Image (tube, rainbow, N blue to C red):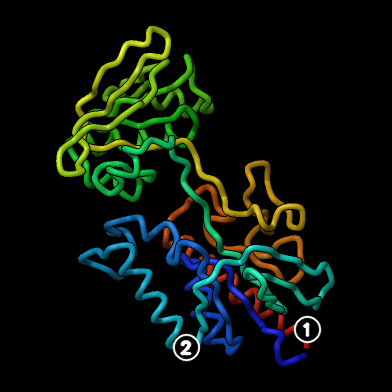
Amino acid sequence: MEENILDCVIVGSGPSGFTAAIYAARADLKPELYTGLEPGGQLTTTTEVDNFPGYPAGITGPEMMMDLQKQAERFDTKVHYEMITKAEFSKEEGGIHKLYAGNKEILAKSVIISTGATAKYLGLDDEKKYNGGGVSACATCDGFFYRGKDVVVVGAGDTAAEEATYLSKLVNKVTMLVRKGEFRASKAMIHRVENTPNIEVKFHHELIGIEGENNLVERAVVINNQTQEKSTVDVHGIFIAIGHKPNTDIFANQIDLDENGYIVTEKGSTRTNLPGVFAAGDVQDHIYRQAITAAGSGCMAAMDAEKYLAELH
C-alpha cells in the first residue's frame, strides 16, 4: 500500500499549479497534477498576455500554459486530464490526504490547491459570443487594447470602481453601468470614480445585449430599469466587473475559507489550517489576481510542501 501514497498532488493547472509542479518536481517530490475542467485555468481565455516577464513580444494565454506544462513535464510531473471531485483531508500532522477523481482514490502526503477562481458573468449569450472580441473580466489584462477608445464597465463594487479608474487612464471614456441607485464600493473608491472626469456613471442601468460585426463589440445595449427605456452606447470594450467566485466548493467544511469563499493562508506563507495542505494562486488571492503573482505563490507552495515533507522524516 505504501508505494501508492504520493508525496505531492497538485489540484489545478493555471500558472500557480504548473509553477508548483516545476518546483516540486525539481525537489524530487514526483508531483502528480490534476488539471480540472479547464486545463490552463483562466489564462486560456485570455488572448494576449503582454505583462508576464520574459515574453518581450507577448504571448497568448493558451501558448503560455502549454509552455508551463511542458516545463513541468520535463522534470517528470505526471499530468492527469481529470477533475478532482471530492477531498477528504487529514487533520493530523503527517496524515494521509484522500482525493477522488470520480471513483479513483488518490492518496497524498501533501496537497497543493491551485483551483483558481472563476470570473462571474451576467449570463448573456452575447458575453460568450464576444468573449475575446471586446468582452473581458480583467481590466489589467486587457485594458491596453482599448487605448483611446470608449468602454463600458458593469458593476457597483470595489472591483468595478477599480477597473473603471484603471481604464480611465488608458481609454477615451468609461461608462459605468450600475444596476441600483448607488454604489456598493467603499467610500474611497467612490470618491476616486467621482473625481475622474472621463467616467460617466449610469445608475439604474443594466447591460441586456451586445451588438457588433465579426464578433467584435461595437455597441452595448442597455436598459434603464426604472423607466424600461432601452438605449445603446457605442463602445469597443465591455468589462464585466461583478466579482470572482473561488473554486473551493469541494473543500468547504474542511478548510478555513473567508467570507467570500477564498482559502485562508497564513501570512507570508501558503499554509492552510490543515497540515500538509497548501493553497496558491487565485484560490487564495483576491487582491492581485495576476499570472505572475499566481506563479510566485505556486513556487512558495512547492517550497512549503517540500519543507513540510522534510520535517516529517
The residue lying at 44 percent from left, 30 percent from top is 155
**Residue at (47, 88) in percent of width and height:** 75
- In which quadrant of the rendered view does residue 104 lie? bottom right
Query: In the drawing, does residue 174 fall left or right of residue 296?
Result: left
Quadrant location, the C terminus: bottom right
Mark 2 residue type: Phe
Q: Which mark is residue 75?
A: 2
Q: Residue 41: x percent and y percent?
A: 45, 61
**Quadrant containing the N terminus in the rendered view:** bottom right
Residue 149 or 84: which is nearer the viewer? Answer: 84
- Horizontal and vertical percent position of residue 164: 36, 33
Residue 71, picture quadrant: bottom left
Q: Is residue 132 left or right of residue 26?
A: left
CA gap between label 2 and label 1 equals: 24 Å
Observer-nearest residue: 299 or 224?
A: 224
Dot 1 falls on a residue whose secondary structure is: helix
Res. 172 visible in picture? no
Q: Callout 2: helix, strand or loop?
A: loop
Nearest the eye: 3 or 59: 3
Residue 223 pos. (x, y %) = 35, 18
Task: Write down the residue under mark 1.
Answer: 312
Q: Which mark is residue 255?
A: none
Mark 1 burial class by Cα count in 10 Å: few <14, some 14-19, many 20+: few
